[in-house]
Image (tube, rainbow, N blue to C red):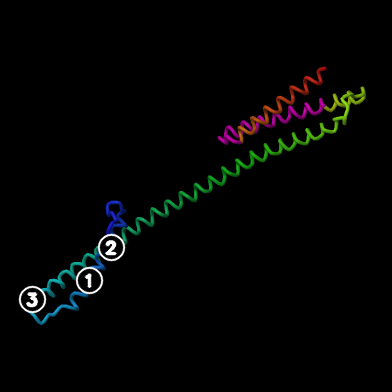
């Protein structure tokens, strides 16, 4: 307690420290009074002074308990207000996190669809040969045109997700959506170039 700075404490804290000091002083004074020799005149005079001090500390404790009770009630009310604020904020945080998860899941579904389309393209690779028959070329062109339609749909979906993420201020999701958009645009350009030949 010696290095406790009373100025740094709240009213509640100062009242508690004062009460503690007054209680400690009561115990100290009662011990002095018990040991005092009241058969001598000086001892009797000293005992009367101690009784007066004891009474004063008793009054201080009575007033201190009232103050402490008032400050305790105020502190409890502040704690309740803080708890209510945190409860409301926690609900907002949960809702916002849920929105973020939903947007990210939408982006994940588009990415999964893109991977499925990419996997279907792998079936057109010829082992050890770059020569395709006319039938294979026609089949490849038809497949690429279908894929191009899918890619453009994925781009539209990704743009909606990017706009939604931007509106909700989810920068990382917006950035991921932009990266996917860039990749889809590049793929569309390559497919357009191949199908235009």
* Residue contact at pointers 2 and 3, CB within 8 angstroms: no
Residue at the disc numbered 2: 66
Circle nearer the N terminus (2, 3): 3
Residue, x 8% and y 76% (percent of image)? 42
* Main secondary structure type of the part rendered in magenta: helix
Relative image position of residue 169 (x, y in whole percent): 55, 35
Circle nearer the N terminus (2, 1): 1
Q: Mark 1 packing: few (<14 Cα in 10 Å), some, or many (20+)?
A: few
Relative image position of residue 79 (x, y in whole percent): 41, 54
In the depicted view, which residue is nearer to us: 56 or 1?
1
Q: What stretch is highlighted in magenta?
A: 144-172
Residue, x 80% and y 21% (percent of image)? 194
Residue positioned most to the bottom: 39
Q: Closer to us: mark 2 or mark 1?
A: 1
In the depicted view, which residue is nearer to us: 74 or 17?
17
The quarter of the image holding the C terminus is top right
Which of the 4 image quarters holds residue 56? bottom left
How much space separates mark 2 and mark 3, taking CA atoms? 36 Å
Q: Is residue 37 left or right of residue 21?
A: left
Residue at the disc numbered 1: 28
- Secondary structure type for disc 1: helix
Which of the 4 image quarters holds residue 32? bottom left
In the depicted view, which residue is nearer to us: 127 or 26?
127
How much space separates mark 1 and mark 3, taking CA atoms? 20 Å
């Amino acid at each position: 307690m010696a290095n406790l700075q009373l100025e740094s404490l709240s009213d509640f804290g100062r009242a508690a420290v004062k009460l503690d000091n007054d209680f400690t002083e009561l115990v100290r004074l009662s011990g002095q009074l018990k040991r005092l020799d009241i058969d001598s005149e000086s001892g009797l005079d000293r005992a009367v002074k101690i009784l007066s001090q004891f009474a004063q500390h008793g009054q201080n404790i009575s007033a201190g308990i009232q103050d402490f009770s008032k400050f305790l009630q105020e502190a409890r009310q502040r704690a309740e207000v803080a708890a209510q604020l945190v409860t409301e904020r926690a609900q907002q945080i949960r809702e916002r996190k849920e929105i973020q998860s939903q947007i990210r899941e939408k982006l994940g579904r588009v990415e999964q669809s893109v991977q499925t389309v990419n996997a279907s393209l792998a079936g057109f690779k010829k082992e050890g040969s770059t020569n395709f028959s006319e039938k294979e070329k026609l089949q490849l062109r038809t497949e690429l045109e279908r894929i191009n339609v899918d890619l453009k749909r994925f781009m539209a979906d990704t743009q909606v997700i990017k706009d939604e993420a931007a509106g909700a201020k989810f920068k990382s999701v917006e950035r991921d959506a932009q990266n996917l958009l860039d990749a889809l645009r590049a793929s569309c350009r390559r497919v357009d170039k191949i199908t235009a030949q």
